[in-house]
Structures are given as structure tokens and as C-alpha cells.
Amino acid sequence: MKSEVEIKKSIEQFIIFLATERGLSINYQLLVRRNLEKFANWTIKQKNVLELNNITTHEISKYLQTRKKDGLAPSSIRQHIVSIKIFFRFLSKKKIISEDVAEGLFAPRPEALLPKTINEKEVEKLLESITRNEPLDMRDRAMIELLYSSGLRLGEIIEALLENLYLDEGHIRVTGKGNKTRIIPIGKKAIEEISYYLDKGRKKLVNSKSSSHIFLSIRGTKLSPSRIWQIVRDRSKRANLKQPIHPHQLRHSFATHLLSGGADLRMIQEMLGHADISTTQAYTHVDEKGLRKIHKKYHPRG
């Protein structure tokens, strides 16, 4: 069929364009080819579509609706839309078609992934499982307390300095994304553990290579991101939590537990260092999810 040859030839030209002029990866080329060939095969089966210029926005929408009815995930639908849009933009620029009928297509918004958290009992279990026997135990307990108490990012805990730590006043100054500095409160338990670590543990890790970073490695240098990840995961495994956790989950838990306790969203935004309140609002969905569970469990008609 003429239409089949025309469409598949155009797809081939487009894939060559992606490879040679755009320099896109082979995996991306294969993904786009697969998406476009599925669209082409469906289009060719439509008796009223004989050539590329006959494809309308309605036809494309009809195809996408069919894919949705087939149970294709929103993320995959999004991929199909992107592939079709960039294909028709190419066809239009090359004057292969007279009008870009895919220009007005809107891809579904990607599903927002809710932050994974651990509950207050799990936080307590994690922290109480870490002894104060050795300098590294003291360090890990103090570090995890601070991650949970103040919601620091991984990079912020790594770069936390002694001169920016004000235990008597109960806060720490950190520099986060966009080189923005903020002051964050530290809870009583975290102050206690940090004080103990500084007094009994850190001095045993210090050597000639050491700087003023609060948390030091066994070699006396600042910790790496991968090492902190490993510490938090290993400690959570030893505490027999349901699943091993990562440092960012302590930040998420910090925000979620504050919100559950009645803290103002703007204050949480300030402590987390979010530039946009919409980023912080993700935690309201976590809280709503928890409230729904409580309602279902305890309400007589839940």
C-alpha cells in the first residue's frame, strides 16, 4: 500500500535525523521508532487514512484513546505523545505535510510520586538501636538525629561545619540549593546526641587532615554522599525496619511529622529550603493519605 510505504519511509527519515543531526542515543531512537510504528500500523488500518496529509488531530486523539483503553500507563501515553509530536514537527519543517496537526496535543502530567516516609515509632527504633559505645556509633546516632530533627539535605549534612552549629541557641546554619543560607532549629534529642558526639567521639576521629566539618570519617575527613547512604541503610537494616531507608526519607519524615503535628506549611517550606511552596505541598498529600487510613480504620462507616 502506498500509504504504508509513505509513512514508514518518513519514520525512517526521522530516525536518521534523530541519529545524525540530533545525536540522540540508540535507546531513544528505538523507543521513538517503536512508538511511531505502533501509531503507523494503527493508522494504516483506518480505511479513511491514505497518506500523511490525511492524518488529522482527531485521528491522533482517537489512537491515543485506544491506547488508553488498552490499559497503557499514563507515563507510556506521555511517551507516545512526545514521539508523535516531534515526528509531526519534523514532517512539517520538511514540508512533507502542509500542517502540524500534532502541535496542539497535550501530554498528561507525570504522576507526582509521594515522598516515602517512616513513622515515628520506626524513627525511635532506628535511633535507639545505635549505641554510644564507639566514636562511629556516636557519630552515626548524632548524624541521623540531626537529619530527622532538622530535615537537612544530604549535601547539607556533609558540609555542616562546627562554626555554623549553635547548640546553646538550638539551631544550625546551612547553605542549600542556589547557595541560599538558612537557619534551622535543632530538637532537644539531636542537641543531646550531637553534644555527646562532639565531646566523646569526634575528637578521636580528628587528625592533621581534618577540617571543621561536624561529621568525620574514620580517616578524619568529611563523609562522602555514598558513605552516608551506606550508614543510614546499614543502621536501618540492623534496627530491623520493614525496609532499608535512605537519608532523604529522614527529611521527608521530618516534614510529614511536623505537618501531622500541626506545623504551618510556610514554616516547613522555610525549614526545608524549598523555593516554591508547591514543592512543600507534596507533604499535604502524604498527610491526607494517612488521615484517610485513620478514618477508614476508626470511623463506624469508614
Image: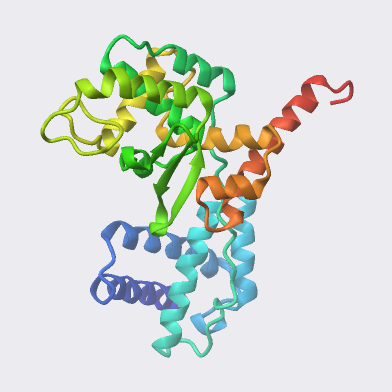
In the figure, residue 95 lies in which quadrant? bottom left
> Residue 7 at x, y = what percent?
43, 75
Q: Residue at x 61, y 72 (%)?
A: 59
Q: Quadrant of the N terminus?
A: bottom left
Of all residues, the one furthest to the left in this rendering is: 208
Decide which of 247, 293 is in the foreground and name it: 247
Taking the image as shown, residue 18 lies to the left or right of residue 294, namely: left
Q: Quadrant of the C terminus?
A: top right
Decide which of 274, 291 is in the foreground and name it: 274
Of all residues, the one furthest to the right in this rendering is: 301
Decide which of 241, 135 is in the foreground and name it: 135
> Residue 41 at x, y = what percent?
48, 64
In the figure, residue 276 lies in which quadrant? bottom right
Taking the image as shown, residue 68 lies to the left or right of residue 262, namely: left
Does 43 appear above or below 158?
Answer: below
The colour style of the image is rainbow
**Can residue 21 be spotted in the picture?**
yes
Looking at the rendered structure, the number of numbered marks drawn on it comes to: 0
Q: Residue at x 53, y 63 (%)?
A: 42
**Can residue 116 be spotted in the picture?**
no
Q: Residue at x 55, y 76 (%)?
A: 102
> Residue 30 at x, y = what percent?
33, 59
> Residue 252 at x, y = what percent?
53, 37
